């Protein structure tokens, strides 16, 4: 009897061997915020790379959108050049490191959290920006497409960062979002009265924050690979 | 005096500006920030340019404040970056933060502020040029290629990911003018292919952060490519394959159209071709079939009834006068039945007026009618001669001329004094004029008239048919003694030997009297055939109950029209009635001709002495008192 049972189990194991393998290595990582275990297949490095790619793309698209908007709607004297910024972005509740030295002093956890905060802070304003841009008469399609794309990618970026936090930090505290501020801060800017300038400021600030995200993530990556060489510089 | 004033003004004009210059003291001009740059996103430097000096030493100072604070800081370092510059070190540099920078120029008299400039370090990054640009030539199976490698600028922290740089390089031959640029991305190495063998290349590299400015080009690196032979094997292979393919297609096309090509280049020589000729039959050895196929069915045109083609209509005059006139008249009036040849389109009647009847005048003794008024004279003339003849002397017959005349006038011997006897026996015989009432008349006719008489000792029977229709036979016999004396024996043959049957004599006799112009009674005779002796076998049409409608039997004078001639369309040209004199003259002419022509047929007749009915060729006499007439006999069909 035992032999028979052993034989059966062996046979079953042989037959279901591909299933076991597939079960052990889940390929897809489609999950909500709760289920992380299934996405153990993807490594942290790969995930970080993907997040970084996301951040890079988002920054690039936001830069192009800002340029488009600037050329279409912003009068020339009021255009801010690249090395100048004539606007003031809203300050975050959470302190964001402003220099490399500061960043180097921040831990990975804070780094990720900073990214997450940034991402979450821009989800709603981008949606608002989309509705605002639709009101424009001659807004080019590319601008609208880009802003829409950016808002979508931002969501996926948020997901990735969340997963990344869980993976890297083994932290499971992402049920509540840190950033709960709405669009209001930007709408209440006293010096910005015109909608055009308001939108322009919105885009510019988002562009900057996208760059921040990208930089943070890249720094994080360096830390993951070679901690010592990153700090030496 | 004037010269002095001018000099003073000149001097004053030169001195015053100098003096005035030194005396001017103004606050400094407005400075201007030209640019701010950060090489590594960690520090940055700003440069400004000074305005006018204002005459006093001016100091410049830079003040800034960050975007969310009002604290104004001054530039920490004015010297590191050179004159009129401000250097911000790492500790003072905050990225993603806007700096509001202002430069102030200050001199003893005052100061001047420049326009504030907002700067975000992130956006002013301009790295240094890449370093350690190395270019090497490497070999490959396709040929040599360049490998360019470099390093990022020292200050840019790309390792930690603080800055992400993208590179760009450009290559050109040393003597070329245009650069060939290549975007290398984030990699630090690049390969260049398709080199010119033996050429010297120049390579330069530069870099840029994803959100900043391009760096300067690195210094050019030179490299020499060794000589090599480019192997363009693939091109030759392609050409060979293509040409072989085309060759195959052409060959295939030509093979398909082999026959037409051959036909085009070497056109076939046309051979003889006979329609309907079958070579296969010839090969089989049946020439009859071969030639039969050549026979065209439609040729010659066939007619089922040969006899129809040979139908000739012969007209015979039935002379009313004969009952009163001597038989000579009968003879005269005897219409020679002219045998028409097949080719003669003329009417069946031998007309004296017809031109074409020259050869067809019947031979033999012709009896022609002459005008009645001429008769008595000739009769007289002839009577004597005849009398001479009758004596039976060995009198040489007259010469042919006279004999002709005699012949011609022979019928005149028979004067109209002869009264036709009422008996049925009609004398179609030649009778002596007035004296003779015998039915037997012997004439001596010269030989030449009957050339055949020499060869035939026996009797000849030239048979004539007189207009009376009675068959009368004239025998001319030759007495052995004279040799030239011919006895003409006219015999009566009440019954016609031939088919010739004329029964209208009686009617004619009754109809006309003497002196009346003889009304001809014509009858049409049909030539049935030509027998072996070239004799016409005649048959009267009346026996068959048919005949041309124009047959008139001793009735009123029929209006006949004279044939003027025959034109090309085989149409008889008719003539209206002419004078009788004309007709008579015509007749004389015809008679003469007729006599000559008449010889030949009789010659033929003489050759064969056969009993039995023979057809005679008679020539009808158309010398009427009235004009010549032509019957509208349907012409014989011609081929």
Image: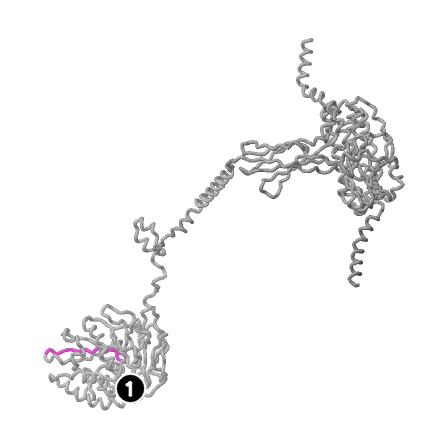
Query: Farthest front residue?
Result: B1
Answer above or below: position of A122 versus B444: above
Q: Let me know if residue B479 is in the magenta part.
A: yes
**Where does the image place residue B409, in percent across and percent down from the top left?**
22, 85
Tell me if residue A201 can be seen. Answer: no
**Where does the image place residue B549, in percent across and percent down from the top left?**
37, 77
Give the camera-side residue of B546 and B15: B15
Image quadrant occupied by the C terminus of chain B = bottom left
Instruction: Report the side of B5 relative to B378 (left or right).
Output: right
Give the camera-side residue of A128 and A79: A79
What color scheme is it?
Answer: one colour
**Where does the image place residue A80, in percent across and percent down from the top left?**
80, 42
Q: Counting other residues with Cα less than 10 Å from the Cα at mark 1, is it few (<14), some (14-19), or many (20 or more)?
A: many
The residue wearing badge 1 is: B584
**Where does the image place residue A121, in percent across and percent down from the top left?**
83, 33
| Snapshot quadrant of residue B628 | bottom left
**Which stretch is magenta?**
B464-480
Q: Let me know if residue B260 is in the magenta part.
A: no
Give the camera-side residue of B498 and B358: B358
| Snapshot quadrant of residue A83 | top right
Instruction: Report the side of A17 relative to A72 (left or right).
Output: left
Answer above or below: position of B311 versus A141: below
Q: Chain of mark 1?
A: B
Tell me if residue B306 can be seen. Answer: yes
Image quadrant occupied by the N terminus of chain B = bottom right
Residue at 33% across, 88% down: B579
Disc 1 element: helix
Instruction: Report the side of B185 relative to B256 (left or right).
Output: right
Query: Farthest left residue?
Result: B481
Give the camera-side residue of B220 and A137: B220
């Amino acid at each position: 009897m035992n032999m028979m049972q052993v034989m059966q189990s062996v046979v079953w194991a042989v037959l279901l061997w591909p299933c076991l393998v597939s079960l052990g290595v889940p390929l897809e990582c489609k999950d909500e915020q709760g289920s992380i275990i299934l996405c153990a297949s993807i490594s942290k490095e790969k995930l970080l790379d993907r997040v970084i790619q996301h951040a890079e793309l988002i920054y690039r698209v936001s830069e192009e959108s800002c340029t488009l908007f600037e050329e279409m709607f912003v009068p020339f004297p009021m255009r801010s050049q690249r090395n100048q910024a004539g606007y003031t972005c809203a300050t975050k509740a959470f302190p964001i490191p402003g220099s490399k030295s500061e960043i180097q002093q921040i831990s990975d956890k804070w780094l990720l959290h900073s990214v997450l905060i940034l991402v979450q802070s821009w989800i709603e304003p981008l949606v608002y920006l989309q509705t605002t841009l639709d009101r424009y008469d001659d807004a080019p399609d590319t601008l609208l497409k880009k802003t829409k794309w950016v808002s979508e990618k931002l969501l996926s970026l948020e997901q990735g960062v969340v997963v990344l936090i869980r993976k890297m930090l083994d932290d499971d505290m992402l049920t509540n979002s840190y950033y709960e501020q709405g669009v209001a801060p930007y709408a209440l800017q006293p010096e910005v009265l015109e909608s055009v300038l308001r939108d322009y400021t919105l885009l510019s600030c988002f562009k900057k924050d996208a760059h921040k995200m990208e930089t943070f993530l890249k720094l994080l990556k360096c830390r993951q690979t070679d901690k010592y060489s990153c700090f030496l510089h | 005096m004037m010269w002095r004033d001018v000099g003073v003004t000149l001097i004053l004009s030169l001195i015053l500006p100098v003096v005035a210059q030194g005396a001017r003291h103004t606050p400094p001009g407005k400075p201007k920030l030209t640019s701010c740059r950060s090489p590594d996103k960690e520090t940055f430097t700003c440069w400004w340019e000074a305005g006018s000096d204002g005459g006093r030493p001016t100091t410049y100072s830079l003040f800034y404040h960050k975007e969310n604070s009002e604290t104004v800081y001054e530039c920490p370092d004015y010297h590191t970056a050179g004159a009129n510059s401000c250097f911000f070190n790492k500790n003072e540099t905050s990225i993603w933060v806007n700096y509001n920078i202002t430069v102030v120029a200050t001199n003893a008299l005052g100061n001047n502020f420049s326009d504030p400039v907002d700067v975000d370090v992130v956006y002013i990054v301009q790295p240094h040029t890449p370093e350690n640009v190395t270019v090497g030539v490497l070999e490959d199976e396709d040929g040599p290629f360049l490998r360019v490698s470099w390093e990022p600028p020292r200050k840019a922290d790309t390792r930690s990911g603080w800055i992400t740089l993208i590179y760009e390089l450009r290559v050109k031959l040393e003597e070329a003018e245009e650069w060939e640029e290549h975007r290398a991305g984030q990699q630090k190495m690049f390969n260049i292919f398709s080199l010119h063998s033996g050429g010297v290349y120049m390579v330069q590299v530069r870099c840029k952060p994803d959100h900043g400015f391009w760096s300067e080009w690195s210094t050019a690196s030179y490299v020499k490519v060794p000589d090599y032979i480019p192997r363009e094997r693939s091109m030759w292979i392609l050409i060979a394959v293509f040409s072989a393919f085309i060759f195959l297609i052409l060959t295939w096309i030509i093979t398909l159209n082999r026959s037409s090509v051959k036909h085009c280049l070497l056109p076939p020589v046309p051979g003889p071709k006979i329609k309907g000729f079958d070579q296969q039959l010839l090969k089989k050895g049946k020439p009859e079939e071969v030639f039969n196929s050549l026979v065209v069915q439609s040729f010659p045109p066939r007619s089922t009834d040969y006899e129809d083609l040979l139908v000739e209509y012969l007209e015979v005059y039935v002379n009313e006068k004969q009952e009163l006139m001597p038989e000579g008249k009968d003879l005269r009036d005897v219409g020679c039945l002219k045998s028409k040849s097949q080719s003669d389109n003329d009417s069946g009647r031998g007309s004296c007026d017809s031109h074409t009847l020259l050869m067809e005048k019947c031979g033999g003794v012709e009896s022609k009618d002459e005008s009645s008024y001429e008769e008595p004279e000739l009769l007289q003339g002839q009577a004597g001669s005849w009398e001479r003849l009758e004596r039976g002397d060995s009198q040489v017959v007259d010469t042919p001329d006279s004999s002709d005349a005699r012949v011609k006038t022979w019928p005149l011997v028979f004067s109209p004094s002869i009264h036709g006897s009422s008996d049925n026996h009609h004398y179609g015989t030649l009778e002596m004029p007035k004296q003779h009432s015998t039915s037997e008349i012997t004439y001596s006719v010269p030989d030449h008239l009957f050339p055949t008489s020499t060869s035939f000792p026996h009797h000849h029977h030239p048979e004539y048919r007189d207009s009376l229709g009675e068959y009368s036979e004239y025998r001319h016999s030759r007495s052995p003694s004279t040799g030239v004396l011919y006895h003409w024996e006219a015999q009566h043959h009440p019954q016609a030997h031939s088919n010739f049957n004329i029964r209208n004599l009686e009617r004619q006799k009754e109809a006309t009297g003497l002196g009346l112009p003889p009304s001809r009674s014509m009858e049409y005779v049909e030539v049935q055939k030509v027998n072996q002796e070239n004799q016409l076998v005649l048959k009267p049409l009346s026996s068959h109950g048919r005949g041309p409608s124009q047959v008139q039997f001793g009735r009123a004078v029929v209006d006949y029209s004279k044939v003027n001639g025959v034109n090309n369309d085989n149409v008889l040209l008719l003539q209206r009635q002419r004078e009788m004199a004309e007709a008579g003259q015509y007749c004389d002419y015809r008679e003469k001709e007729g006599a000559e022509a008449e010889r030949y047929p009789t010659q033929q007749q003489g050759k064969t002495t056969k009993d039995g009915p023979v057809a005679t060729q008679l020539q009808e006499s158309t010398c009427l008192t009235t004009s010549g007439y032509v019957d509208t006999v349907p012409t014989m069909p011609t081929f």
